[in-house]
Image (cartoon, rainbow, N blue to C red):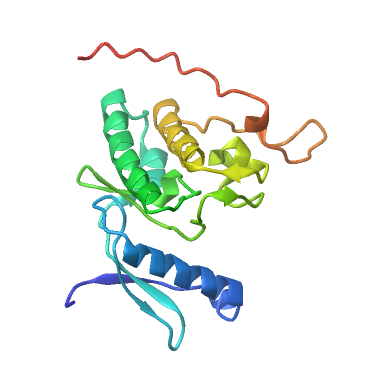
Amino acid sequence: RDCRCVAKVPRPDKLNEVKTRRRLSTEGWLLQQLRHPHIVTCYDILDDPHPAVILETLQGHTLAYVLDEMTETLILEETAWLGVQLCSAIGYLHTQGWLHLDIKPANIVSEFGQTKVIDLSVARRPGKGLSGIGTREHMAPEQARGGELTTATDVYGIASVLYECLAGRVPFEDHLGENGEEYFPQLELSAPSLGLHYDGP
């Protein structure tokens, strides 16, 4: 292609793990089936000497980096535009019969006002889930309990990201119970209200 690209490969200590190699190959295969302006493009999949997924180079930063570097939260209009692009990308993924299941700021890249979703390594079809797949702070309740996964699971992930953009924090920060055990507060609590009001057109 005569262009700069990125090779996504397993960590050196995971090179010989069948599960890791299969997950990477599945991600590459899935990305090659997708064509959307807000989802990273896959150019090729390599098997030798080691598995690699060849992706387009994105010039921007991850949303996680942007949020960490900002001294203030995103304004409502910026967050709304981000939400439109995320919904477009994830809505398209859903029409192809897949769920992302790990929507979080670290898996969103922003460049020149354009958003791209990356990392479909845990993407799967709707259906019965496995507890612990995804990122704890952005998991929907049914995802946390290993229940039935639907398109609503990703909608929760998008809402969680937009909440973090506006609040400067994730909806649920404390994941330790009174006795120090880990738990998922989203299974029994609602996120604190942001108290935002939009007076625009």
Residue drawn at point x = 55 percent, y = 20 percent: 192
Q: 38 or 195, which is in the foreground?
A: 38
Position of residue 75 measured from the top left corner of the image (x, y, whole percent): 30, 25
Q: In the rendered view, does 193 fall on the left or right side of 201?
A: right
Residue drawn at point x = 40 percent, y = 69 percent: 28
The mark tally for this picture is 0
- Res 195 quadrant in image: top left
Q: In the rendered view, does 73 fall on the left or right side of 17?
A: left
Is 162 placed above or below 133 here?
Answer: above
Is 144 placed above or below 98 here?
Answer: above
Quadrant in which the N terminus is drawn: bottom left
Quadrant in which the C terminus is drawn: top left
Position of residue 94 measured from the top left corner of the image (x, y, whole percent): 40, 47
Is 20 placed above or below 141 here?
Answer: below
Position of residue 200 measured from the top left corner of the image (x, y, whole percent): 23, 14
Q: In the rendered view, does 87 fall on the left or right side of 19?
A: left
Residue drawn at point x = 52 percent, y = 68 percent: 23
Residue with the most extreme right position? 179
Is 190 placed above or below 28 here?
Answer: above
